[in-house]
Image (cartoon, grey):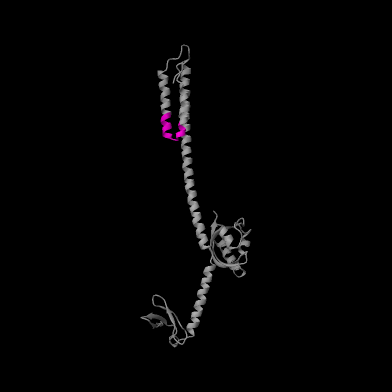
């Protein structure tokens, strides 16, 4: 480009370089800026000479200002384009992370619903308690509920288990040991529920316990199943011991784990070990040293 005065209007190349930012291709902008600077140099050589009496200094200033404007514009476009591309890449990563976290949250919620599991934390500095919705539901409380203090949270445990639970949490606070207790709680809606509480102390830079966080699981069904097994075993033993014959059970490797204690054979060999071989009970004598 040139003017009637023979001045290369190189500054007009700057809008062209600026327009290239829409393509978001830094390499293309770099080449375009280099071509604009080259065109300014060619215009200086090929344009008509300035009219007589027109200071040559003004011509040089025109070229230098034009080159500076194009160079700065090119640098700004490249810098902003690269920043925009990095922002887009960052947003893409955030969307991927958000999707992964959402999927993991859904898996955790599904596992929590199946296993009756929820999360909790005790802030030992502020005294605040945080319960997940699953823990609140185990206590018969509305979703979003959390006790006002640690003592309020521990008061849900039945009176017979409360001292044991408080001792476990005190040990975790003082000695930094993990918490693992099985105990019963009284819910707000009048139920009694067996729960397992496990927790891990969190230490600050000075090694002092500042928080205890962990999980709570409803184990009522497991405890009821254990009770049914115990009752069935007691009934079996009562029935077996009332019969006038030897009744026994054995492990898969052939070791007898139960024999009716009223049999005369058992009384004749106190302290012996009994094994099952080819369907028969045999005694392994105990050899005393000395």
Q: Quadrant of the C terminus?
A: bottom left
Residue 125's quadrant in the figure? bottom right
**In front here: 220 or 33?**
220
Residue at 46% across / 28% down in the picture?
16
Residue at 46% across / 39% down in the picture?
85
> Which residue is at the far top?
52
Taking the image as shown, residue 202 lies to the left or right of residue 78, namely right
Q: Main secondary structure of the magenta part?
A: helix
Residue 168, x across and y down, in percent: 57, 65
Residue at 47% across / 48% down in the picture?
96
Residue 279, x across and y down, in percent: 37, 81
Task: Please count the marks in the image.
Answer: 0
Residue 265, x across and y down, in percent: 43, 87
Residue 84 lies, with reference to residue 158, above or below; the image says above
The answer to if 26 sits in the magenta stretch is yes
Residue 32 lies, with reference to residue 219, above or below; the image says above
Q: Quadrant of the N terminus?
A: top left
Residue 83, x across and y down, in percent: 48, 38
The answer to if 210 sits in the magenta stretch is no
Residue 287 lies, with reference to residue 51, above or below; the image says below
Q: What stretch of residues is rendered in magenta?
A: 20-32
Residue 44's quadrant in the figure? top left
Residue at 50% across / 82% down in the picture?
238
């Amino acid at each position: 480009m040139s003017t009637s005065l023979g001045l290369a209007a190189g500054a007009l190349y700057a809008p062209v370089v600026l327009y290239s930012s829409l393509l978001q291709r830094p390499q293309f902008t770099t080449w375009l800026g280099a071509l604009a600077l080259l065109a300014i140099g060619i215009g200086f050589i090929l344009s008509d000479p300035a009219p007589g009496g027109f200071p040559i200094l003004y011509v040089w200033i025109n070229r230098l200002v034009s080159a500076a404007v194009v160079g700065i514009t090119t640098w700004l476009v490249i810098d902003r384009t690269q920043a925009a591309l990095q922002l887009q890449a960052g947003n893409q990563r955030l969307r991927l992370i958000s999707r992964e976290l959402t999927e993991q949250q859904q898996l955790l919620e599904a596992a929590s619903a199946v296993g009756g599991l929820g999360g909790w934390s005790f802030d030992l500095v502020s005294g605040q308690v945080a319960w997940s919705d699953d823990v609140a539901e185990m206590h018969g409380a509305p979703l979003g509920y959390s006790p006002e203090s640690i003592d309020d949270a521990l008061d849900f445990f039945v009176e017979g288990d409360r001292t044991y639970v408080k001792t476990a949490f005190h040990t975790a606070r003082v000695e930094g040991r993990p918490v693992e207790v099985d105990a019963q709680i009284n819910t707000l809606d009048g139920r009694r529920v067996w729960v397992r509480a496990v927790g891990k102390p969190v230490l600050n830079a000075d090694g002092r316990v500042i928080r205890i966080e962990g999980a709570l699981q409803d184990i009522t069904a497991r405890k009821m199943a254990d009770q049914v097994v115990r009752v069935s075993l007691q009934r079996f033993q009562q029935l077996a011991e009332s019969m006038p014959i030897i009744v026994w059970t054995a492990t898969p490797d052939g070791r007898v784990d139960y024999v009716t204690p009223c049999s005369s054979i058992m009384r004749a060999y106190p302290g012996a070990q009994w094994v099952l071989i080819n369907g028969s009970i045999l005694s392994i004598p105990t050899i005393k040293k000395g």
